[in-house]
Image (tube, rainbow, N blue to C red):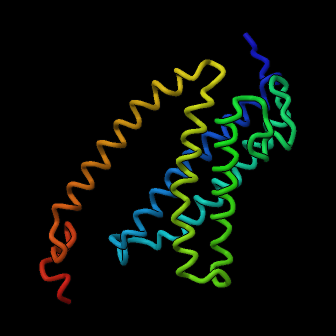
Amino acid sequence: MHTDASPHLFWITSRAAGTVSLLTASVAVGLGLLMATRRLRGRGPDLRVTHEILSLATMVALVIHAGALVGDGFLHPSVLDVSVPFASSYKTLWTSMGIVGAWMLIVLGLSYYARARIGQDRWRRLHRITALAWLLGVAHTLGEGTRCGPDLVLDHGRHRHRARARAAAFALRRWAGRRPDSPARGAPRGALNQ
C-alpha cells in the first residue's frame, strides 16, 4: 500500500514547522522566565546559549511554517496572507493572532543583537513582551485547530494545559515556601554565607 503525500506536502511541512516553532518557543520562553528569576544564576551551564539557540530555531521554524503555506494547494494563500495580519480570509482572527505573535517573536528575538543600541535595561523590559507573543501562538494553535477538526487540538490541549498548570502550581508552592535565606536544595549548609 502506497500513500502519495505530494498533494499535502506543503500543508504537512507547514504543520510540522508550526509544531516545532510552538515547542521550541515554549521551551525558550520557559527557560527565559527561569533565567529572569535569577534562581538559576551560577548553577549549571550557561543557559543563555541554549535560550538563544532555541529562539533562533523558533524563528526559522516560523518562517518555514508561513512559507510552506504559500505552496498549499487547498488554501492557496499569498505571501501577503501569511505575513500581514487580517489580510487572509481564512479564520482571520486566529490567523492574524499567529501572524502578530510570529512577528513579535522574530522582532523581539532579533532585538537581542541590538541590545547595546537599545540599552540593556530598556531591552530587558521590551523582551518581557515575548511571553505575550508566545500566548498569541498558543491561541493561534488552539483556534486554527486542524483539518481533522479543532476538537482534536483542543481536547489534547486541555490535558496538557492542566498538567502544565499543576506542575507550575507545585513549583510555585515549593518556591514560595522556601525562606529567602535558605540554601538551594542539595547545597551544603552555610553555602549562602560563603
For the question of whether residue 21 can be seen, the reply is: yes
For the question of whether residue 50 can be seen, the reply is: no
| Residue under the image location 63 percent in, 64 percent down | 108
Q: Indicate the position of residue 41 as horizontal and vertical percent values.
A: 37, 76
Q: Indicate the position of residue 140 as horizontal and vertical percent values.
A: 60, 38
Left or right placement of residue 162 versus residue 113 in this view = left
Left or right placement of residue 36 versus residue 26 in this view = left
| Residue under the image location 19 percent in, 74 percent down | 180
> In the displayed structure, would residue 182 be above or below residue 85?
below
Could you say which is closer to the camera, residue 106 or residue 57?
Answer: 106
- If the image is split into quadrants, where does the N terminus sit? top right
Residue 69, picture quadrant: top right
> In the displayed structure, would residue 181 be above or below residue 145?
below
| Residue under the image location 84 percent in, 33 percent down | 77
Q: Indicate the position of residue 63 as horizontal and vertical percent values.
A: 75, 49
Number of numbered callouts drawn: 0
Could you say which is closer to the camera, residue 158 or residue 48?
Answer: 158
Could you say which is closer to the camera, residue 151 or residue 56?
Answer: 151
Left or right placement of residue 143 versus residue 163 in this view = right
> In the displayed structure, would residue 144 be above or below residue 129?
above
- If the image is split into quadrants, where does the C terminus sit? bottom left
Left or right placement of residue 10 versus residue 171 in this view = right
| Residue under the image location 33 percent in, 70 percent down | 39
